[in-house]
Image (tube, grey):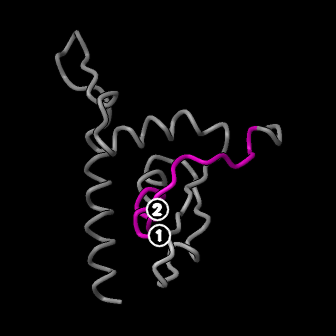
Amino acid sequence: MSEQENRPEPLVSVTTDLEAAMIVSALAAQNVDATTTGSFTAGFRAEAPGEVQVLVRKRDLPKAIELLEELRGTPDAARTNPDSGQVAGSGRFLAVSVLVLVLALVLTRLI
């Protein structure tokens, strides 16, 4: 594998470290390694805007984009299989994503 394939690429920028963590967890459930950067500035509570970037390896970027679109329910995730009439994509991914979201919300209440 070349260094270029392992180079971190930004997938998405979000406003909270919690949302970024949920995206990282959902990607990890689909075997896509991801990390975040910028969480300290996003968490700074002086009314200063900040953002957290989710980064993935360059080689994983196309898959990560597809998974993120599916997670967010964008139109690309609503493609149908003409043979079966079923929506393409992983219902399991969405279920895991919802579970991660609920778990994150419960954990933030406990902390």
Numbered circle sitting on residue 99: none
Q: Give the image location of residue 16, x and y in percent.
A: 44, 68
Residue 55 picture location, percent across and down: 60, 53
* Disc 1 to disc 2: CB gap under 8 Å: yes
Distance from disc 1 to disc 2, alpha carbons, whole Å, reads 5 Å
Q: Quadrant of the N terminus?
A: top right
Image position of 31 with respect to 19: above or below: above
Given residues 77 and 51, the one toward you in this image is 51
Is residue 11 rendered magenta in the image? yes
Q: Secondary structure at mark 2?
A: helix
Quick one: which residue is furthest to the top in this view? 83
| Extreme residue toward the bottom, this view | 111
Going by the numbered disc 1, the residue's amino acid type is Asp
Residue 36 versus residue 13: which sits nearer the camera? 13
Residue at 40% over, 62% down: 22
The residue sitting at 34% across, 45% down in the picture is 71
Q: For the residue marked with disc 2, what is the amino acid?
A: Ala
Magenta extent: 5-24
Instruction: Give the residue drawn at x 22%, y 26%.
Output: 87
Answer above or below: position of 94 versus 23: above
Question: Relative to the observer, which residue lies in front, 50 or 110?
Answer: 50
Question: Residue 17 — which label?
Answer: 1
Please tell me whether residue 37 belongs to the stretch shown in magenta. no
- How busy is the neighbourhood of tag 1: few (under 14 within 10 Å), some, or many (20 plus)? many
Q: Can you tell which mark lies on residue 20? A: 2
Q: Residue furthest front?
A: 47
In the displayed image of the protein, which residue is found farthest to the right? 3
Tell me if 104 is positioned left or right of 56 in this view: left
Q: Is residue 64 left or right of residue 85?
A: right
